[in-house]
Amino acid sequence: MTKKWNILRGVMAALMVAGIVACATIASPPQDLVAKNDHAGLETWYVKEAAHLRKRTKDMMAMAEEYRKLPSRPGSGPAKILLVQHCQTLVETYAKAADEADAIARAHRDMTGG
């Protein structure tokens, strides 16, 4: 029983670290573009960032599906559910961040008069 709890604690710790990393989903735009007030460059950067985040969303969806397919072993149910839920949380986080990056790209496009 102790071995199972140690494994579950390890999984939980890994998920917490991944969750902390996921919180910083949109990277900071290049400071030189901000300093130059380069709205066209910033629009391009945010469009690329949104595409990157949508790719991460798809990757997490695929990972959740792979976890769902794992054969269940006695006692592995809670860990499997936790892993799938974690992936689903990241899917939502990345999708929201991609939508926000798209909105910021549109705002920069509007500032260029485009």
Image (cartoon, helix red, strand yellow):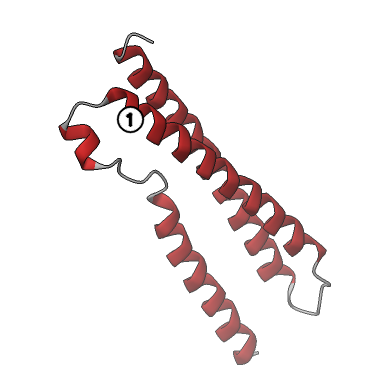
Question: Residue 101, located in which quarter of the rendered image?
Answer: top left
- Spot occupied by residue 40 in the image (x, y as percentages of width and height): 33, 24
* The furthest residue to the bottom: 2
Residues packed near mark 1 inside 10 Å, few (<14), some (14 to 19) or many (20 plus) = some
Residue at point 84%, 72% (across, down): 71
Q: Nearer the viewer, residue 62 or 38?
A: 38
The residue beneath circle 1 is 41
Residue at point 74%, 69% (across, down): 77
Q: Quadrant of the C terminus?
A: top left
Q: Amino acid at mark 1?
A: Gly
In the displayed structure, 5 sits above or below 21; it is below
- Spot occupied by residue 55 in the image (x, y as percentages of width and height): 59, 46
| Mark 1 secondary-structure assignment | helix
- Spot occupied by residue 35 in the image (x, y as percentages of width and height): 15, 34
- Spot occupied by residue 3 in the image (x, y as percentages of width and height): 62, 91
Q: Nearer the viewer, residue 42 or 5?
A: 42
In the displayed structure, 17 sits above or below 73; it is above
In the displayed structure, 13 sits above or below 86; it is below
Q: Quadrant of the N terminus?
A: bottom right
Q: Nearer the viewer, residue 41 or 79?
A: 41
* The furthest residue to the left: 35
Residue at point 77%, 60% (across, down): 68
